[in-house]
Amino acid sequence: MTKLYQKLIKSCPSETEIKKGLKKISSTLPAVPDKHLLMSILNMIDLTSLNTTDNKSHILHFTGKVNSFSGRYSNIPNIAAICVYPNFVSVVKEKLTAKNIKIAAVAGAFPSSQTFRSIKVAECKMSVEAGADEIDIVIPVGAFLGNDFALVADEISEIKAAIGQKHLKVIVESGLLGDYEQIFKASMIAMDAGADFIKTSTGKTPVSATPEAAFVMCRAISDFYKETGIRVGFKAAGGIVNPADAIYYYQIVNHSLGEAWLNNTLFRIGASRLANNILSEISGCRVEHF
């Protein structure tokens, strides 16, 4: 670990501070969601299809819905990215015509991160070669819990080097890490190793994103930025379905990091059902576009 990591790891917020901060943020949440805010959040969604049953036909249809969105909702900004398994990146690349939509791939033996490192690196590199703009990987959680932090950092650095200028989102799988200090530590390791984003969860574990984990991770991002001047993005993912929950995460980012992070360059929400629920809230009737 670098001296920077050793310095910053000591600043993890206490449980009391986390609870106090979240209570303050909760008090600012609107009783009725603002439509313009919901539109902004829609534009921060990584729309995901990460099912065992996914096939080419499904992904083509999925991408077609994103393509047709602006034609149906010309006054509402589209989503930020389409997120799929690596083998479907080329399918999305060929079909996608909507402007300013990124292609994200989960790679590196997602969601377990349990295979040979060379395979993880190759899969990430192949995803970029197929057309991915962004790569979402999971830290080797077992190695992290075994205190092999150097292995975790080295793997992230190697994958980042393999994908070059493409954005690397590193999932710390916060629901498996046990306590806030571990979440903070994993976040710092990921950023110090070159992550462009840190992300809560895969959505494939019993506990996914939580406001507490988001608060801790955003504090880590804030401390890292103050020390380095590097803005690392934050992505909340897993179990975020309702517009009210999405607004809560938005306000955590606003409170912890400020307006500079309130855009889809630095803040994302990974979701599938959330997009339709936000559209329904904006429209005032049930919408199933996505």
Image (cartoon, helix red, strand yellow):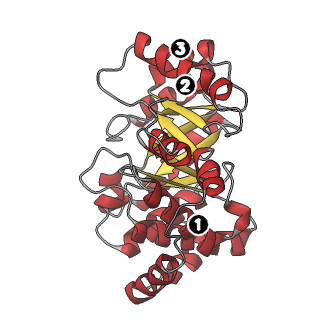
Q: Nearer the viewer, residue 54 or 109?
A: 54
| Secondary structure at numbered mark 3 | helix
* Above or below, 49 relative to 55: below
The residue identified by callout 1 is 253
- Within the image, what quadrant is residue 2 found in? bottom right
Left or right placement of residue 152 versus residue 147 in this view: right
Counting residues from the N terminus, which is met first, the one under dot 1 or under dot 3? 3
Q: Nearer the viewer, residue 180 or 109?
A: 180
Across and down, in percent, residue 38 comes to 58, 52
The structure residue drawn at horizontal position 45% and vertical position 63%, both measured from the top left corner, is: 186
Q: CA distance from mark 2 to mark 3?
A: 12 Å
> Looking at numbered disc 3 in the image, what kind of residue is underneath it?
Val
Left or right placement of residue 19 versus residue 73 in this view: left
Task: For label 2, count other residues whose C-alpha is less than 10 Å away and answer few (under 14), some (14-19) or many (20+).
Answer: many
Q: CA distance from mark 1 to mark 2?
A: 29 Å
> Looking at numbered disc 1 in the image, what kind of residue is underneath it?
Val
Q: CA distance from mark 1 to mark 3?
A: 33 Å
Is residue 114 visible in the rendered image? The answer is: yes
The structure residue drawn at horizontal position 40% and vertical position 71%, both measured from the top left corner, is: 212
Counting residues from the N terminus, which is met first, the one under dot 1 or under dot 2? 2
| Labels 2 and 3 touching (C-beta < 8 A) | no
The structure residue drawn at horizontal position 52% and vertical position 72%, both measured from the top left corner, is: 29
Across and down, in percent, residue 154 comes to 51, 50
Task: For label 3, count other residues whose C-alpha is less than 10 Å away and answer few (under 14), some (14-19) or many (20+).
Answer: some
Across and down, in percent, residue 195 comes to 59, 52
* Above or below, 47 relative to 211: above
Res. 175 mark:
none
Across and down, in percent, residue 231 comes to 70, 61
| Secondary structure at numbered mark 2 | helix
Q: Nearer the viewer, residue 59 or 39?
A: 39
The residue identified by callout 3 is 91
The residue identified by callout 2 is 127
